Image (cartoon, grey):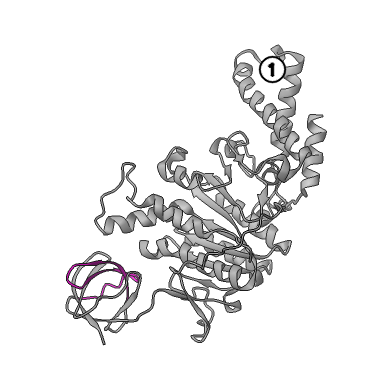
Amino acid sequence: MNQGIITAMKNLVVRVVFDTAPPDVNEVIVVDNENKTPLLVDSLLDGNIARCLNLTADKTLQKGMAVARTGKSIEIPVGDEMIGRVIDALARPIDGQPPIDEKVQRRNIFQLPAASNSFTASKPEILETGIKVIDFFTPFVKGRKIGIIGGAGVGKTVLTMELINNIANSGGGLSFFAGIGERIREGHELYETLKERDLLKNTCMFFGQMDQNPIQRALIGISAVALAEYFRDERGKDILFFADNMYRYVQAKNEVSTVLDQVPSEGGYEPTIFSDVKTLQDRLSSNDKGSITAVQTIYVPADDLSDPAVQMVQHELDSTIVLSRAVAEQGIRPAVDLIQTTSSLLSPDIVGDRHYLLSVQVQGLLQKYESLKGIIAIIGENELSAADRADYAKAKKLITFFSQNMHVMEAQSAEKGESYTREQTLDGIEEIIV
């Protein structure tokens, strides 16, 4: 048996020297101690030395402890047993339910699925969310990526919970939720909300929250994607994949990079930020067997949309829903900035001529509203021309129209949640602007 010895430790980094061949990169090796501490091989150095990451942040490790190879990487159970469960990055249940049977088939989270040689261009399929502002400005198209971008406390998680609730209620496939570095309270609220509404039966949940070490926070998204790939490829399922929060993923990778003494890039982020984000995003893809439609929240530090990490993730998205503090302060929910929200999917061949032409008219009115606000602040609304006054009034009605009560906030707001079909939304907009 090829064994190693711990020769050095610094923070979460452990160096292990092996007597013969070292393990493979991404292999899990186990320390011969009471906790059987798992270490993940990060890189190999000269002299049969493996530089490893302490997955569980076990503080009982000591120099001289023996380490054994497993020949395996991090593996998660796959199959129906995972539906309705909440697990961490190492496939350990955190929902208080019994452990998952050891006999259940498992999958290496780092193993990329086999590339498909066949490709057929399918007609874009729109998934209705029941939320007016999203169905109109950033229509959900099966197999594409949508981002919800905003600073702290503007409603990213609430909007995500509403989307999960609405889409799960419509029976639209299997939902995945990956909680990356977010608050424990939010994860608990989401779990209880889904449980109350009997939606756990078609949801898989993964959490690597704020109390976890950065290694587990960096791995949780990859673990969730590995299971989503299984259901897509082996079961032919259409997956709705929610990730909250992609910026926390970058932060976690950044912390791991710091622990490994890597020199940061110009923006202060880890040197491999581009490839790390790209690798995860590329796995959130569709093929001829099934689709993964991804909804990702992105925290904006200091409300700065030009932050390099925010820009990096944004480049991977088809649509971006921008939540604004200024809109939230007006009491409008969801607090969507209608001007900055964009979608490459808002084209006639996807949404139809009627929807597309209405979106052009609405954007024109909203742009005019923004330019008139400054003038009105100086000379007052009565000094505008009759046409400008009419357009300004229409824009105000549109902004109010896109406000909507959320089902998942019924207990807090005492307001009944609302859902609208895309047809109802288009009818309501036509009434305002025609």
Q: Which residue is mark 1?
A: 381
Q: Residue 117 versus residue 254: which sits nearer the camera?
A: 117
Q: Residue 182, can we see it?
A: no
Q: Is residue 45 magenta?
A: yes
Q: Percent position (x, y) of residue 245?
A: 49, 54
**Residue type at mark 1?**
Glu
**385 horizontally vs 375: left or right:** right
Q: Is residue 424 above or below residue 248?
A: above
Q: How many discs appear?
A: 1
Q: Is residue 347 magenta?
A: no
Q: Is residue 401 above or below residue 407?
A: above
Quarter of the figure with the N terminus: bottom left
Q: Percent position (x, y) of residue 334?
A: 63, 44
Q: Residue 214 versus residue 139: which sits nearer the camera?
A: 139
Q: Residue 149 versus residue 116: which sits nearer the camera?
A: 116
Q: Percent position (x, y) of residue 192?
A: 60, 66
Q: Percent position (x, y) of residue 116?
A: 56, 64
Q: Is residue 39 above or below residue 274?
A: below
Seen at 56% across and 48% down, the residue is: 147
The range drawn in magenta is 38-62
Q: Residue furthest front?
A: 117
The image quadrant that residue 205 belongs to is bottom right
Quarter of the figure with the C terminus: top right
Provide the secondary structure element on which disc 1 rests.
Answer: helix
**162 horizontally vs 353: left or right:** left
For disc 1, the neighbor class at 10 Å (few under 14, some 14 to 19, many from 20) is some
Q: Residue 245 versus residue 73: which sits nearer the camera?
A: 73
Seen at 67% across and 31% down, the residue is: 363
